[in-house]
Amino acid sequence: MAEFDYYEILGVSRDADTNEIKKAYRKLAMEYHPDRNPGNKEAEEKFKELSEAYAVLVDPEKRRRYDRYGKAGVQGGPSGFGGFETGGFDPFDIFREVFGSGFGDIFGMGGSSSRRRYAAQRGADLQVRVKLTLEEIATGTSKKIKIKKFVRCQVCSGTGAQSGTSRKTCPMCHGAGEIAYRQGFFTVSRTCSRCGGEGTIVEKPCEACRGEGRVRGEATIDVDIPAGVSEGQYLTVRNAGNAGPRGGPNGDVLVIIEEKPHEYFERHGDDILYDLKLSYTQAALGDEVEVPTLTGKAKITISPGTQSGKILRMRGKGIPHLNSHGAGDQLIRVSVWIPTKLSEKERKILEELSGCENIYPKKGDKGFFKRMKEAIF
């Protein structure tokens, strides 16, 4: 489907609220519904575009991503990151959500229910959580995750029918999955009570799965996690979830990211913060010290006269930007360590030093927060 502007297709402004979006969709979807425009391919495409636009703009998170990144922001990439695709949705399902199931798919004598069979029921999605270290987040990683789920029954190959038998067309709805009723001006449809909307029935259920076409089992999935992910984000592993009943397609697995607390670092966006303690002499005289990073250790130079609270910056040593070039920084916050116990010799040296005027703060010396602001910005 060609690229188009979701706001333009619904005829609403970019700051329209949810009620305006729903109202616009209701009006246009009724106008362009295929059963009011039999054989009109343009109306059918317009109906699909309307439903796609509505599905995105009525959802606050999808709308936020669309406003920021355009259509690419609501379509899963090669890795499925982000968890949403506009492709593959059923515009008739969206129509039923807005207007209610009583409208079905038909308005008058068009007879869509007789033309259109229900799709096999899709298996439920699963959620799993994976805990990552900051080092794994910084480089990206691969994980093998074992999950318990419904898997296809091997005895009946997922059909739900005994070996040597097959599923039969439902005698009540004749395979349509729904029954049409006349109600005044409208002809409405309801899900067939005999087959549950599947259009077929199992006369002799498989004993292994009791006609479900699936049994409880487990599987191991491989997940490639890109560098730069954050707590609460998720990856979508397509078709790795529960098997659908009686041959229905698999659901997905949502892999939710959790971050393990780090021994040294605090994460702030794509920057990481490390607290470095220096002795009074190191801060006053300067020194070269070794600090940990996400990829090993590095040496930094401490300038003479470094003040407690000063922020040093190691550019590009933080977390890589997700789906982009570059990385955050490693910030090093300096604090001067004060010993709590002194030997007699140390005490005498400090007492002698206390007589020197230069070791005391000067009038008008900048406070800690002002020095931090200047160091960062």
Image (tube, helix red, strand yellow):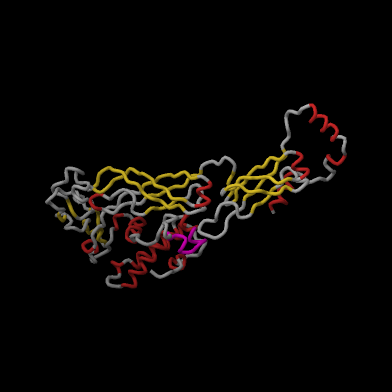
Q: Between residue 215 and residue 18, name the one nearer to us.
A: 215
Q: Is residue 22 visible?
A: no
Which image quarter holds the N terminus?
bottom left
User: Where in the figure is residue 109, as x and y percent of width and height?
Assistant: 23, 66
Q: Assign the magenta stretch its main secondary structure.
A: helix
> For the C terminus, which image quadrant?
bottom right
Toward which corner of the image does residue 75 lie, by quadrant? Answer: bottom left
In this rendering, position of residue 249 left or right of residue 235:
left
User: Horizontally, is 287 left or right of 321 in the view?
Assistant: right
At a point 69% along the width and 48% down the height, the residue shown is 311
| Depth order, front residue of 247/291 | 291
Count of all numbered marks drawn on residues in the image: 0
Q: Is residue 73 magenta?
A: yes
Q: Residue furthest left?
A: 164
Q: Which residues are magenta?
A: 65-76
Q: Residue at x 48, y 47 (%)?
A: 232
Would residue 38 be found to the left or right of residue 131 on screen? left
* Residue at the extreme top of the image, as rendered: 344
Residue 119 position in % (x across, y down): 26, 57
**Nearest the eye: 28 or 206:** 206
Q: Position of residue 234 (x, y in %)?
A: 45, 50
Q: Residue at x 76, y 27 (%)?
A: 343
